[in-house]
Amino acid sequence: MQISALKWVLILGLSAGLSTPVAARSVKRWHDKMPPAPGAPRSIGAYTSGCIQGAQALPSTGPGFQTIRRSRQRFFGHPSLIQYIRELGHIMDTENLGILSIGDLGQARGGPMPSAHLSHQTGLDVDMWFWLQPKSRPMTPAERETAQPPSMIANGRLALHPKRWTSRQMRLMEAAASFESVERIFVTPTIKQALCKAFPGAAWLRKVRPWWGHRAHLHVRLRCPHGDPACVSQPPPPEGTGCDATLAWWFTDEARRPSGGKSKPVPMPEACQAVLAQ
Ligand SMILES: [Zn+2]
């Protein structure tokens, strides 16, 4: 999920009872370049208000994946997220589906970012492009700094792009959602609709949640790791595949006008101040 930096600062300011300049300084502290906090891996707090100790860095490239815009320093995550990306890359590689382009994970110690995301704060979220780079021609490091992912949607929002969306993207979604560790995957409603048609009744469809944006990338969110008591998970998605009236709602006029401000601000856990200070 993405949100403008200004809106983010406003939300943080409200939640903490702080003036906007102080909130902006707080974001900068998390963004300042620093190594991961030492210690055993721990995701602390909520996806939209938390931090991580003992994060790992995802390498620049590996079998079946390449990372995008590394200069942003958002390639850190919980070891379970790093393992997930490696395993998904392995599937892409062995099934010759193309190279998966990995966008933002989180910062070295998690926390709020100066742009783009409200979540991605506990090392358990990752954005990945639907567009799959041909294996014969990986992007150069310079290309990976500036490339933009192409949208999978044509004709406004009602149809998938006939050339870009292929059986390989279907397989990517199936593989990505089938891991037990996955809590949710956010995609544009048109993609969820296509998956409902292609995989009727598949249990993993429950995890695939329609959301605004997400036409060019999927956002994977992992569950709180086992034995991580300070990690705050989300309520599970409603029972069933979600290929029902709740999906149809996304194609109504009401859904086209997002009301905004739906997510309630959550205060940052006290333990995150210690993670920042280490
Ligand atoms: Zn995201």
Image (spheres, rainbow, N blue to C red):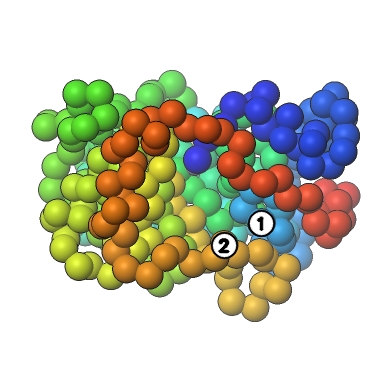
Q: Which residue is the site of mark 2? A: 234
Q: Which residue is the site of mark 1? A: 46
On the image, the x and y values in percent for residue 137 come to 24, 33
Look at 16% across and 61% down and name the residue there.
Answer: 199
On the image, the x and y values in percent for residue 88 come to 34, 58
Report if residue 139 is visible in the image.
Answer: no
Residue density around tag 2, few if under 14, some if 14–19, many if 20 or more, within 10 Å: few
Q: Residue furthest bottom?
A: 227
The label shown at residue 136 is: none
Q: CA distance from mark 2 to mark 1?
A: 8 Å
In this rendered view, identify the residue nearer to me: 246 or 78: 246
On the image, the x and y values in percent for residue 113 come to 66, 36
Instruction: Point out the tag, 2 or 1, that comes first from the N-terminus.
Output: 1
- Label 1 sits on what residue type? Ala
In this rendered view, identify the residue nearer to me: 29 or 146: 29
Q: Quadrant of residue 143?
A: top left
Q: Quadrant of residue 226?
A: bottom right
What secondary structure is found at the residue carrying circle 2? loop
Look at 50% across and 61% down and name the residue there.
Answer: 222
Q: Quadrant of residue 163?
A: top left
Look at 67% across and 32% down and name the residue there.
Answer: 8
Is residue 206 left or right of 41 when viewed as pictured?
left
What secondary structure is found at the residue carrying circle 1? strand
* Mark 2 touches mark 1? (CB < 8 Å): yes
- Label 2 sits on what residue type? Gln
Look at 87% across and 38% down and name the residue there.
Answer: 17
Residue density around tag 1, few if under 14, some if 14–19, many if 20 or more, within 10 Å: many
On the image, the x and y values in percent for residue 200 come to 16, 63
